[in-house]
Image: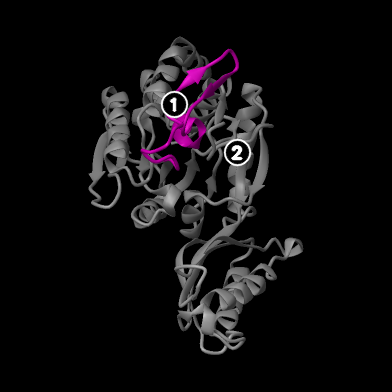
Amino acid sequence: MQDCLQSYLTAHRRPMFDLLEKLVRINSGSHNKAGVDAVGRAITGALADCHLQLTVIQTEMAGNALVFRTPALPARPGQVLLVGHMDTVFGPDTDFTDYREDDARSYGPGVIDMKGGLVAGIFAIRALAAANLLNRIALALVCTADEEIGSPYSRALIQTEAQKSACAFVLEVGGTDGQVVTGRKGNLSARLTVSGQSGHAAFAGKDKASAITELAHQILAIEALNDPSAGLSANVGTVAGGIGPNTVAGHAEARLDFRFIHPEDGLRLRTRLAGICGNPTVPGTVCRMDVLSGRSPMPAGGANQHLYRRIARIARRLDISLAPEFRSGVSDANLIAAAGTPVIDGLGPVGGEDHSPREYMIKHSLPQRTLLLACILADYAAAD
């Protein structure tokens, strides 16, 4: 079985990189629906001869999500779920549009976050089909279109599929020392809005109800929530307010990001934010906190460790380096974990500098991680 899968992937190494280049050259920023849908059509074409059932979830405000399924019925309850996202952080106006390779690396927008992971998933499935194993596993591949903006449209789909699954694998970038992700922090994204009393700066006294002054107090209180020893991070990422230097600001706002390890930390965080926001320092100002998105933590223990040990045995057989990692960043794996489904993330190829014009993938990791994923799925086919 392993030899058959490896032979197929060795013979198709160049087509893997050709597909990667094709996907990377399609701009698929989260808000570029046409581009994300074009990536979806390319993925559909790449899987066309695998005899999968395809469901397209039409979405007006983002690209369409895709669900590919094998027709197999499992001998035991639950399917195996693969999840990847087609959108990137690079909008149509980016200058980072090119794909290129050298001997060791591939470069381009989304090359590891996460079009390389999509390619790994596609060719793992193709290898299983070539080995006549695909019809022996109940498998669903979900390709989403909005992960980089918090999965507002695909969240329910992911959690519904997770609830039907015995386990799940997410195709985000792997760690540079062979890590896969067994746990992740949770996050909360919020907008803080401050309303004050506008006026002419020439006539303002020390008691002016400036929204910017109050926002400054709020920022200091929010940044004071940082507690590295507890794994809690608080960050004020953007600020805006006022209409000119000679006016008292009647409006100001900030965008906030928080990360935490335990669900109860997230609940305490919301309580503390409500306390800060509900007690402005500058008289005459009013503060409002709106939660924009959030994901629960992905616990690293229990069922995830059992699943990790299973795939680690396969990696050792393949002589592929593998190690567990807890990441501060969030992904759709957090949503899967919230549904109670064991999940391992970071099964995509290895690289770095994602979300920047320096994004790269280590080339040898693409066929290597694809083989690992194919053998993991084949292990479930053999078990059924």
Q: Mark 1: which amino acid?
A: Ala
15 to 30, vertically: above or below: above
Q: Residue at x 45, y 10 (%)?
A: 11
**Foreground: 102 or 348?**
102
Stretch in magenta? 88-117
- Residue 295 at x, y percent in the picture: 50, 60
Which residue is the site of mark 1? 124
Which residue is the site of mark 2? 310
Q: Earlier in the sequence, mark 2 or mark 1?
A: 1
Q: Nearer the viewer, mark 2 or mark 1?
A: 1
Tell me the crowding category of disc 2: few under 14, some 14 to 19, or many 20 or more residues within 10 angstroms, Cα based.
few
Identify the residue at the far top of this view.
11
Q: Is residue 82 left or right of residue 256?
A: left
Tell me the crowding category of disc 1: few under 14, some 14 to 19, or many 20 or more residues within 10 angstroms, Cα based.
many
Secondary structure at numbered mark 2: helix
202 to 338, vertically: above or below: below
Identify the residue at the far front of this view.
202
Q: Is residue 246 magenta?
A: no
Q: How is the image coloured?
A: one colour
Tell me the chief SS of the magenta region.
Answer: loop
Q: Residue at x 66, y 74 (%)?
A: 221
Whether residue 171 is visible here, answered yes or no, is: yes
Q: Is residue 143 left or right of residue 192?
A: left
Secondary structure at numbered mark 1: helix
- Kindly check if marks 2 and 1 are in contact, taking CB atoms under 8 A apart as contact: no
